[in-house]
């Protein structure tokens, strides 16, 4: 086949954009969608010269009655007003009220009757169980005068009117006394509460959202006092905590902070092992053995002890307590610090927990520190629970319970490793890089899921890491768009079934794609670390992350944020057609002069022809003429057709037509297979779609003949339909209907 082609710099690659179908502005900048930079938050994504944030210090006494499961507490809060405005009232969070009678979650949750015998309820607290949840606020007083303060409870929020306006730079002390009845976590599936063990009659308490806590007041939206509905988590203020916890004297406690009175609450042998663990780096030291824990299950002390903990510059405080706890610990070297990794678990967690939990803490602290900032806190706990996983500063609650005979599946092992790495990893996001979880779940869950996958990739070769990769999310992303929400969506307004992919998996997949395909590991890691270090112990917003990643990398990522975070588009690129060309060999006359050939237009001459299905028809021959007619300015006079023909002589030219069927613009990863069996991977940036978002043509020059072309051979971009990514086209498999027609 013979055609004539007028080529413009073909040897530098030619991009021909097809006519637009529908323009959606996928490469438009995000400027108009992001908040205007100011002296608090700069255009580079860094905290500004006038950045400020509030602070709240807590002094708390709390007691758990192990017979009645009632928690009673009193606290003194010192609130520092660093805002450039006067405050006449403050807001606190009463998260336990999410299970009080008439709570907003129960009122607004959609329910349905499945059949005549079963109903779908979530969680209807007092309506479903004989449980009276929620805080009982006994008093709210001025700490200096002892006078009562006026307060108003609005579901899970409490407003306290101040006796006098609190000016910038001032602080105010007030006291609160409260109590509530603990809930059975096994019934309610909540983050905190107790698990009862009927075999030995003991309890294991994980205490979360257990005290009235200050809401965030910031430069972005003032008070963050959105109601707690159960799914969107927490926005919290940094401060220092001194907490005294009274429990039965045979209990072991782990908490957010360092134990201040070890000599008073530990036995001499426990204290000796505790001190040894602080200097042991190779394997965990048992501070309380299984035999000792089992003995306490039976003996049950009637005395009480008070454990005191201190935590500096944290946004929250949680603890766990039980006489059933086995306790092991080991030191971890992180920069110039040696935090103590500690695990607490009942005998029901062994042998898996004794073998893996503390080691998983160590792996997490080391990998996360290398990618963000050195872990700054003195301790990190992993506490065994029967279900779920939940995170707090320096402590987290994690599932992973073997069968009663001690055996466990590889799936349980994988799940336990994943949840411990994930929850310990939350120390970095959002406990240190303190994002607003109530509004933007992806800023902690998504970033953390990405680093969870990276930790497993580096330290656990026997654990599956498909989840959180573009490939692992491709099935979800091609689903029903009417039911999906963009990543940039309020946490509580994401349908429950989509919350995991939306807040965890999809952001992790996006960051994996950004690191491995768009930016490259070295550039991404530098920018990601810059974000973590800029916003450590501060309160970033989405724009701060977006801007920092671009500022620290010199990569324009607005198209990426726009597509992955603001839409529900998916990656689906079709290799629609491939044309193979060779430049025609020149024929010369007796005087050795080049014979001129007639000009022609390849596009016009190819009209009406069917698309090629393979390479069997051979290459079309083309002739290079009048290339300079397509050039502009001084460059035009430097173009010589003969030079171009010489460069292209004997080369194979492949024109690929690619269609963006999923809507999400993406880099192209092309695998070329040659006639000699060798392969080549070629990457094209996503900017190839910037002129036409729907279809592009691109010509590639190859020395060798190509026998096969695959777009995204390893599904690194998360393409949802790999069947149309191949040339020669693969014959579609015969359907069962077609087979039946033959019979």
Image: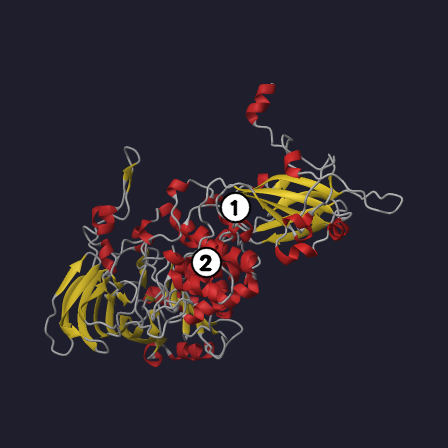
Residue 692 image label:
1
Q: In this view, does 310 lie above or below 190?
A: below
Mark 2 vs mark 1, CA separation in Å: 33 Å
Find numbered disc 1 in the image and state the secondary structure of the residue it sits on: loop
The residue closer to the viewer here, 723 or 6, is: 6
Q: Which of marks 2 and 1 is in front?
A: 1
In the drawing, does residue 487 fall left or right of residue 176? right
Q: Name the residue under label 2.
A: 449
For marks 2 and 1 on the same chain, the one whose residue lies earlier in the sequence? 2
Residue 226 image label:
none
Q: Are marks 2 and 1 in contact (CB under 8 Å)?
A: no
Find numbered disc 2 in the image and state the secondary structure of the residue it sits on: helix
Local crowd size for mark 1, using a 10 Å CA cut-off: few (<14), some (14–19), many (≥20): many
Q: Where is residue 711 in the image (x, y as percent from the top left)?
A: 61, 46
Q: Can residue 472 be seen in this view?
A: yes
Q: What residue appears at the point 36 percent right and 57 percent down from the top-left corner?
A: 440
- Image quarter of residue 2: top right
In the drawing, does residue 122 fall left or right of residue 655? left
Local crowd size for mark 2, using a 10 Å CA cut-off: few (<14), some (14–19), many (≥20): many
The residue closer to the viewer here, 204 or 158, is: 158
Q: Is residue 345 visible?
A: no
Q: Position of residue 409 (x, y in %)?
A: 51, 52
- Which quadrant: the N terminus? top right
Q: In this view, does 4 lie above or below 75?
A: above
Q: Position of residue 338 (x, y in %)?
A: 47, 77
- Which quadrant: the C terminus? top right
Q: Is residue 440 above or below residue 338?
A: above
- Image quarter of residue 534: bottom left
Q: What residue appears at the point 43 percent right and 61 percent down from the top-left corner?
A: 546
């Amino acid at each position: 086949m013979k055609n004539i082609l007028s080529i413009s710099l073909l040897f530098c690659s030619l991009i021909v954009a097809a006519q637009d179908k529908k323009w959606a502005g996928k490469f438009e900048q995000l400027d108009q969608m992001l908040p205007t930079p100011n002296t608090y938050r700069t255009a580079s994504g860094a905290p500004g010269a006038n950045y400020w944030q509030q602070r709240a210090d807590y002094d708390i006494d709390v007691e758990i009655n192990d017979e009645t499961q009632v928690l009673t507490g009193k606290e003194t809060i010192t609130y520092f007003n660093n805002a450039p405005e006067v405050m006449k009232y403050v807001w606190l969070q009463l998260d336990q009220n999410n299970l009080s009678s008439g709570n907003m979650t129960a009122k607004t949750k959609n329910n349905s009757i499945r059949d005549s015998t079963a109903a779908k309820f979530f969680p209807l607290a007092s309506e479903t169980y004989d449980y009276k949840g929620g805080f009982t606020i006994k008093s709210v007083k001025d700490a200096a005068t002892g006078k009562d303060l006026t307060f108003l409870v609005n579901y899970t929020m409490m407003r306290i009117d101040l006796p006098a306006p609190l000016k910038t730079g001032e602080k105010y002390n007030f006291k609160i006394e409260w109590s509530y009845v603990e809930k059975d976590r096994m019934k309610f599936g909540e983050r905190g509460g107790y698990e009862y063990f009927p075999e030995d009659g003991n309890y294991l308490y994980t205490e979360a959202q257990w005290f009235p806590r200050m809401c965030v007041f910031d430069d972005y939206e003032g008070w963050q006092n959105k109601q707690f509905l159960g799914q969107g988590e927490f926005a919290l203020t940094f401060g220092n905590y001194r907490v005294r916890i009274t429990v039965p004297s045979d209990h072991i406690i782990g908490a957010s902070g360092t134990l201040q009175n070890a000599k008073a609450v530990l036995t001499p042998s426990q204290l000796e092992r505790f001190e040894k663990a602080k200097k042991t780096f190779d394997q965990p030291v048992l501070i309380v053995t299984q035999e000792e824990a089992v003995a306490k299950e039976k003996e049950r002390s009637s005395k009480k002890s008070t454990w005191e903990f201190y935590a500096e510059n944290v946004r929250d405080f949680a603890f766990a307590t039980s006489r059933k706890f086995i306790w092991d610990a080991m030191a971890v070297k992180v920069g110039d610090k040696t935090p103590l990794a500690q695990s607490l678990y009942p005998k029901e967690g062994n042998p898996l927990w004794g073998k893996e939990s503390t080691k998983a803490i160590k792996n997490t602290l080391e990998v996360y520190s290398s990618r963000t900032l050195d872990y700054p806190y003195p301790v990190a706990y992993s506490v065994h629970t029967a279900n779920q996983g939940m995170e707090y500063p320096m402590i987290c609650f994690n599932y992973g319970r073997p069968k009663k005979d001690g055996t466990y599946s590889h799936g349980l092992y994988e799940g336990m490793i994943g949840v411990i790495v994930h929850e310990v990893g939350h120390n970095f996001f959002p406990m240190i890089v303190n994002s607003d979880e109530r509004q933007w779940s992806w800023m902690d869950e998504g970033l953390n899921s990405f680093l969870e996958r990276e930790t497993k990739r580096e330290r656990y070769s026997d654990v599956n890491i498909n989840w959180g990769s573009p490939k692992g999310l491709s099935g979800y992303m091609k689903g029903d768009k009417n039911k999906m929400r963009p990543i940039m969506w309020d946490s509580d307004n994401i349908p429950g079934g989509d919350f995991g992919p939306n807040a965890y998996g999809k952001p992790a997949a996006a960051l994996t794609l950004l690191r491995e395909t768009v930016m490259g590991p070295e550039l991404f890691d530098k920018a990601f670390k810059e974000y973590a270090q800029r916003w450590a112990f501060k309160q970033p917003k989405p724009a701060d992350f977006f801007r920092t990643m671009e500022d620290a990398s010199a990569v324009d990522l607005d198209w990426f944020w726009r597509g992955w975070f603001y839409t529900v588009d998916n990656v689906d690129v079709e290799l629609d057609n491939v044309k193979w060309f060779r430049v025609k060999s020149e024929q010369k006359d007796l005087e050795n002069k080049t014979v001129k050939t007639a000009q022609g237009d390849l596009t016009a001459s190819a009209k009406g022809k069917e698309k090629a299905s393979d390479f069997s028809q051979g290459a079309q021959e083309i002739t290079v003429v009048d290339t300079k007619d397509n050039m502009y300015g001084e460059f035009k006079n430097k173009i010589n057709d003969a030079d171009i023909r010489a460069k292209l002589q004997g080369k194979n030219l492949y024109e690929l037509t690619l269609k963006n069927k999923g809507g999400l613009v993406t880099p192209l990863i092309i695998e070329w297979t040659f006639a000699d069996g060798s392969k080549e991977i070629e990457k094209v940036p996503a900017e190839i779609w910037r002129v036409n978002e729907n279809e592009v043509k691109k010509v590639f020059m190859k020395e060798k003949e190509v026998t096969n072309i695959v777009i995204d051979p390893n599904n690194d971009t998360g393409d949802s339909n790999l069947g149309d990514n191949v040339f020669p086209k693969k014959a579609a498999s015969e359907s069962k209907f077609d087979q039946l027609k033959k019979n």
